[in-house]
Image (tube, helix red, strand yellow):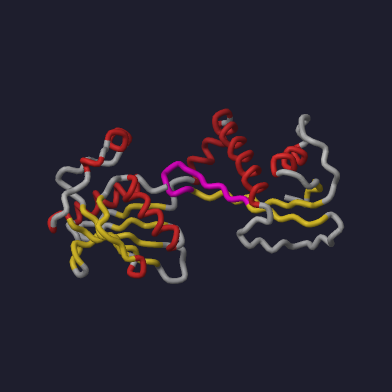
Amino acid sequence: SDWIVGGNGSADQVFAAMRGDKSAVTLPASARYKFRVRIEPGIRSGSTEIYLEEHSLPLGDLVSTGVDWTGTSDNTELEGVALNSIAYYLGDEINRTPSFSMLATNIGGQRAELIPDRLKPVLKYKLPFDRAWATVGDALEQAKINVEDLDRSSAIYYVYYDAEHAGEPGFFSRLFQGDEAKAERNDKNRYIVRLDAREKTDEVDVTVMKDAKTLANADVAEQLLKIIKEYST
């Protein structure tokens, strides 16, 4: 955005005044605000992620042509209020306007891709390693996959997974799945979920091993990777 002249107050007051809301509290002009919005495809198919960053300057300060966008807002409360407002607006427009719905469909689902293979299926994330590591961990927890241990330095999750009794991922299996779905802790059900970050790119490959040197059965690996992808958010 261009620099927007505003006042000082609570985040709700400042943003309402910027929007020109009729009920907004009148704030004396005392600062300039600038926002940057970035929209990216989400991990789950059909989803979209919105990022917003805010910077501000006292009104009397010299305004430079460039802004050092560091990834951290000057006012995180104002960032949150603005982001919520944008999310509500986009949600409204997607429901009312076909073009917004088409846009959401087209840009979603590109950050996680399952590549089937007869020997070594791979789940590919277009994410930085830290984000991919957290995503896999959250997915395993949400899917109630029994995690025995993890080693972040080696990028490994040790899990128990019973392929014979696990159903395909989907809405109803997620709705009714309980703790009883967790696999028994035995060698037959023990697997390694390994993450490999590609050098100089924000991409991570996830594979399933039976042990440190042996690939898991391809069908079992693909089934487990499908579940991880389904629960990735």
Name the residue located 68 percent from the left edge and 56 percent from the top edge.
74
Residue 105 is a magenta residue: no
What x and y, as percent, mark residue 173?
27, 36
Total residue callouts: 0
Name the residue located 58 percent from the left edge and 39 percent from the top edge.
87
In this image, 121 relative to 152: left or right?
left
In this image, 85 relative to 217: left or right?
right
Name the residue located 76 percent from the left edge and 33 percent from the top edge.
21
In this image, 30 relative to 50: left or right?
right
Q: Nearer the viewer, residue 158 or 203?
A: 158
Residue 93: which quarter of the image? top right
Q: Residue furthest top?
A: 96
The residue stretch that appears in magenta: 42-52
Above or below, 25 relative to 215: above
Above or below, 115 relative to 97: below
In this image, 151 relative to 45: left or right?
left
Q: Residue furthest front?
A: 10
What x and y, as percent, mark residue 34?
73, 52
Residue 57: which quarter of the image? bottom right
